[in-house]
Amino acid sequence: MSKLLKPTHLISDVSAKNLKAEPISFPFKISPKIINLLPSSALEEHVFQMERSLRSAIPQEFFRKNTEDFIHDLPNQLPHLDWEFSSNPADCLRISFLTESTKEEEIEFTVLKIIKKWLIPGKNLSILSKKSLSFRWDLFPGSNFYILEMNIFFEESKDLSIAEKNLPTLRKDILLSLQDKRFSNHILALRPLSTSYKMEIVHKELIYLLKKYATYFDENLLKELARFISLSPSSFIDPRPARLICKIVACHYLMRAFIQRSINLFPETRHLLIRYVKNQLQFHFGSKPVVGLILAVSILDKHDILEETHIEQAAQALLPKLQIVRGSFYSFQGNDDQIKCMYLELEKKDGSEIYQFELEILKKELEEELKRRIQTLVPSIFMIRNEEETMKNILILSQEFRHLSDLPQVMISLDRQSSSEILFTVIVVRLQKLAQLSIQKKFEKSNLPIRFIPDRVQQVGFLR
C-alpha cells in the first residue's frame, strides 16, 4: 500500500506538502461496497451514522498519530473489538468491531454467537440494535473493511459486572476464532469452564502448540482440555503450575493418538505409555517434591481394571517407600473407548526427594509391572442347586436303559462361576458291572486339568 496520498483522499484543507505531518482528520470519507446508481437518502443516512461509529471503533491511541503512521499502523491492529458502557443510567453496553475483510456474514455470525452465548453465560441477551456496513475507505484504496456495532441492554445491574469481567476474555476468543476456524466450534461449544488466569495461560499455550505443530495436533486438543477441566476439581488444579496442566493435556492427546494407531496394527497386544514429570507442588505452607506419571493404556476387555491402587502397588513393589499423593489421581475413559488416560503423582513417605536412580528404576520396570497388575473381572454366576430337580433328572436318565449293552447316560449343568474356576454338576447313570472302576478312581488316574469333587453314589434301579 502506498503511503503517498492525494489531497482529495481526505476531507481536510491540509496541503499536500504537509499531509504526512498533520494529525488525522475527521470525519472519514467512506463509501459502501454496494453499487447504487440511484441516489438514496436512507443509504446516505446509514453511511453517515457508520462514519460516526467508525471513530468509536478505532483504537484511541490512533487519534494522536499523523496520517502516514495511521495508514501504516492501523491494518496491523485489525481486527479490533472495543466496548463502552453507558454512564447514566448504566444499563447498556455498546460493542464496536472493525476488521479488514470481505467475509461479512461469517464474521457477523461468529461475533454474535460468541457474545450471545458467553457474555452472560446461561442468559439470553437483549440486543437493542445492531448495524453494520461493508465499505471502502479513502485512506486505504483497494482494501475492503467491515464494521459492526451493537447495543446490548441489561435487565439486572449485576449482569454489568459479569459482562465487564468476561469481555477481555471474549475479545481474545473472538479474534482467535476469526483467525482460525478450527477454534470457533471449541469456543462456542467447549469453552473452558474455568476462566481463571491459570486456565487462560493453559489455553494460550495449547493454541500455540496447535498452530506451531499442526501436523501433530488438531482441534481435538481443545476438547481434551475442556474434558480435563470439567473432571478436575479446583483442589487438583490450584497447586499445580499451568505448564504441568498443559503438558498433561498435550501428552494425553499424543498418547491417545499413538496407542490408537498401535491398536489398529496389533489389536490383541496390551499397549501402555508412561511419561515421567518431576514437579514441585505449591501450597500455602510450602512446596513438596513429587514425580508425576502421565499414563495411557489400551483396554483389551471391557472388564479390565487399572486403578489408583494397582499403580501404587506396582510402584511399591519396585520402591517400597513410595506412595501416591492424595488427591492427585485423574482418569478418563469414554463409553466404548479402548484407551484409558490417567495422571497421578508419587512421593516418598518421609517427604524426601525421589532420586534420579530411583526414577530410572521406575522407567525401566514400572511399565511391565503395571501390565501384570491389570485385573480382568469375571462376572460371578451362582445357581442354587435344586435337590428335587437333581432326583428328577436321575430318574429320567435311568429310564433310558433297556439292554445290558446300553451306554451310560450323562447330564451336565452349570453350578457356579468365579474369577478362578467354573463348577459343573455332572449326573452319570450307568450299569454297574463287576470289577468296574468308579468314576473317582478314573479321574485320579487321569492327567486332565480337572478337579473331581464327589457328591454321592446311589443305586436307582434294576434291569431285568
Image (cartoon, rainbow, N blue to C red):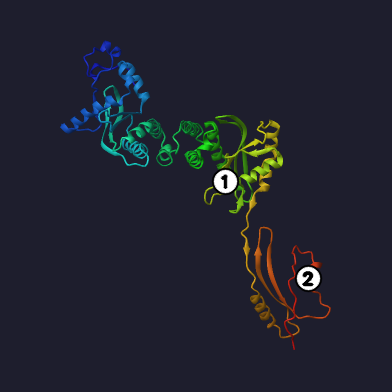
The three-letter amino acid code for the residue at tag 2 is Gln
Given this view, does label 1 or label 2 mark the residue nearer the observer? 2
Q: Is residue 2 visible?
A: no
Pointer 1 residue: 340
Q: Name the foreground residue: 392 vs 321.
A: 321
Furthest-front residue in view?
285
The numbered disc on residue 282 is: none
Residue sitting at 65 percent across and 79 percent down?
A: 392
- Choose top left, top right, bottom left or bottom right for residue 102: top left
Residue sitting at 23 percent across and 23 percent down?
A: 29
User: Could you tell me residue 305's position as x and y percent?
Assistant: 61, 50
User: Could you tell me residue 306's position as x and y percent?
Assistant: 62, 47
What secondary structure is found at the residue carrying circle 1? strand
1 or 2: tag closer to the N-terminus? 1
How packed mark 1 is, by other alpha carbons closer than 10 Å (few <14, some 14-19, many 20 or more), is some
- Choose top left, top right, bottom left or bottom right for residue 50: top left
Instruction: Assign the C terminus to one quadrant of the image.
Output: bottom right
The three-letter amino acid code for the residue at tag 1 is Lys
How packed mark 2 is, by other alpha carbons closer than 10 Å (few <14, some 14-19, many 20 or more), is few
Q: Is residue 304 visible?
A: yes
Disc 1 to disc 2, C-alpha distance: 48 Å
Q: Is residue 194 above or below residue 440?
A: above
What secondary structure is found at the residue carrying circle 2? helix
Q: Is residue 372 above or below residue 116?
A: below
Furthest-top residue in view?
17
Pointer 2 residue: 440
